[in-house]
């Protein structure tokens, strides 16, 4: 017999007290029947009317938006962005929180993940509990730093640029994104007609004047003529096979960081905040303290940001091996690091390439995996290499905490943790953990 479909609760409203913040840009509340709600657009301690946006009777949890604030937190402000709010643009999570409160909330999320998934208190992780803003981002409440150097716009059926609503394919048309970097806003993407396009990505490189527009047309659509008041490159992504074609201009942008220029081709990873690359290189190098002659690994190396920084510091007697799965990124990394004869970049997945290298010992490791983290197998392999120090750069505190537990099983402890708000107004946060053999720290 088929089970009866459970009744959808979408649209139901509950008056609730908002509890702590949770990972993902929402807070936790409970209905009077005890059902858990993940409530967006709310802040801890508030009393709100929460309207369900996803979920059905008997579900483990429901998702909801705070649609009326009955008792406001002192951390609440009117969202400066006119496109933020329940059912609107899904890009920012914390427009309604003061900047300092946003960082506090992010810190609480990191602390909770570390405790729950790695059994670590902030003190045990060598962290003072603060979340540092990037240079220049400490703005008064009501102002928004314009930091996003890469913006992926979705396109409405009638050709208007916008951003996706939260957990939805629907597009919220916008005429200006407040967190977009000046170089992106100047391209005026929101003011043009993009009929026939599925998405339009705008990139404004840091430290060079390079600007790029990447078009993904719907199947069979004709490309619009992209003419803007400035030189820029235009690429097109084939919807069917993901291949990138150059329409005009260079097929890459040049990004400056750590005193060097990095070529980044389409699909290659580069940090979105203009200060992020330098902030992270500084934190990693201060934590690792590379010495001349060191042998170092840069895992998930992208276009070679940390490999280049390491190569500079380990000198001609040292060596650096980078591993990266993206083909285009590997080509860029090899190009970017061509001046260092003792740097090698291998293409493939870390989990398969690293064991094949035959390396049994290294001095230093940087790993900067994607959101899923490195995973137990890779961490086990890394702990067997007996590095003096390991720098783990993480964009997801949950994945970081899970991997830190594997590192502990392999005999490593966290020496220091630093947390940076490189994604203001959103729930995202970047962590740099420095690890060393536990015996050394004991
Ligand atoms: C967060 S980015 C870091 C890039 C670089 N460290 C930087 O800061 O610019 C993660 C990189 O890992 C690559 N990647 C994802 N999964 C991978 C895997 N299993 N093995 C190797 N590289 C992978 C992605 O292509 C991406 O370039």
Image (cartoon, helix red, strand yellow):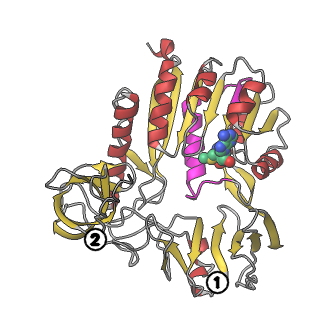
Quadrant containing ligand 1: top right
> What residue is pinned by disc 2?
11
In this picture, is 380 found above or below 169? above
Q: Residue at x 45, y 30 (%)?
A: 416
The quadrant the C terminus occupies is top left
Residue at (38, 42) in percent of width and height: 110
Seen at 55% across and 39% down, the residue is 373
State the image quarter where residue 298 is shown: top right
Residue that numbered label 1 is attached to: 194
Which image quarter: residue 247?
bottom right
State the image coordinates of residue 371 (x, y, percent, origin top left): 54, 46
**Around disc 2, counting alpha carbons within 10 Å, would you say few (fewer than 14), some (14 to 19), or many (20 or more)?**
some
- Determine if residue 438 is in view: yes
Q: Nearer the viewer, residue 64 or 358?
A: 64
Label 1 residue SS: loop
Q: Position of residue 374 (x, y in %)?
A: 58, 35
How far apart are labels 2 and 1 at the CA level?
33 Å
Q: Which residues are magenta?
A: 269-297
* SS class, disc 2: loop
- Position of 23 with respect to 175 (left or right) is left
Q: Where's residue 386, x and y in %?
A: 62, 17
At horizontal 45% and vertical 64% (from top left) the residue drawn is: 167
Figure label count? 2
Does residue 406 lie above or below 80 as drawn?
above
Residue 291 in the magenta stretch? The answer is: yes
Disc with the residue nearer the chain's start (2 vs 1): 2
In the image, taking residue 341 as reference, residue 137 lies left or right, namely left
User: Which residue is farthest front?
Assistant: 1
Q: Nearer the viewer, residue 106 or 119?
A: 119
Instruction: Give neighbour class at mark 1: few <14, some 14-19, many 20+ (Cα, 10 Å).
Output: many
Marker disc for residue 423: none
């Amino acid at each position: 017999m088929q089970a009866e479909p459970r009744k959808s609760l979408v649209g139901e409203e509950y008056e609730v007290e908002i509890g702590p913040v949770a990972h993902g840009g929402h807070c936790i509340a409970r209905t009077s029947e005890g059902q858990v709600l993940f409530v967006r657009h709310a802040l801890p301690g508030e009393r709100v009317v929460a309207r369900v946006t996803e979920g059905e009777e008997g579900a483990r949890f429901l998702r909801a938006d705070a649609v009326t604030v009955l008792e406001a937190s002192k951390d609440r402000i009117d969202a400066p962005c006119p496109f933020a709010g329940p059912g609107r643009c899904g890009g920012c999570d914390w427009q309604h929180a003061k900047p300092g409160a946003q960082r506090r909330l992010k810190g609480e999320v990191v602390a909770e993940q570390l405790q729950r998934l790695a059994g670590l208190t902030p003190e045990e992780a060598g962290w003072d509990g603060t979340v540092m803003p990037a240079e220049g981002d400490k703005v008064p409440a009501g102002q928004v730093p314009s930091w996003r150097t890469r913006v992926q716009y979705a396109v409405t059926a009638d050709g208007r640029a916008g951003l996706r609503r939260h957990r939805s394919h629907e597009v919220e048309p916008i005429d200006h994104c407040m967190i977009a970097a000046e170089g992106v806003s100047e391209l005026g993407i929101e003011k043009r007609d993009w009929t026939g396009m599925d998405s339009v990505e705008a990139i404004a490189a840091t430290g060079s004047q390079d600007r790029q527009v990447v078009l993904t047309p719907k199947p069979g659509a004709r490309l619009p003529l992209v003419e803007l008041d400035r030189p820029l490159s235009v690429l097109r992504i084939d919807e069917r096979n993901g291949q990138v074609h150059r329409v005009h201009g260079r097929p890459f942008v040049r990004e400056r960081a750590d005193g060097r220029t990095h070529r980044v081709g389409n699909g290659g990873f580069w940090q979105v905040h203009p200060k992020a690359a330098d902030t992270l290189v500084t934190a990693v190098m201060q934590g690792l303290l590379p010495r001349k002659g060191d042998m170092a690994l840069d895992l998930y190396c992208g276009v070679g940001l940390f490999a280049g920084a390491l190569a500079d510091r380990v000198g001609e007697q040292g060596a650096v091996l980078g591993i990266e799965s993206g083909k285009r990124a590997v080509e860029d990394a090899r190009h970017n690091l061509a001046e260092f004869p003792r740097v090698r970049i291998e293409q493939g997945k870390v989990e398969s390439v690293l064991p094949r290298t035959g390396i049994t010992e290294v001095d230093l490791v940087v790993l900067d995996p994607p959101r899923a983290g490195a995973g137990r197998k890779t961490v086990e392999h890394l702990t067997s290499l007996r590095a003096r120090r390991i720098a783990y750069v993480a964009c997801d505190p949950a994945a970081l905490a899970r991997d830190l537990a594997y590192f502990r099983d392999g005999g490593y402890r966290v020496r220091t943790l630093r947390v940076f708000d490189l994604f203001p107004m959103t729930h995202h946060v970047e962590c740099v953990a420095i690890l060393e053999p536990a015996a050394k720290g004991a």
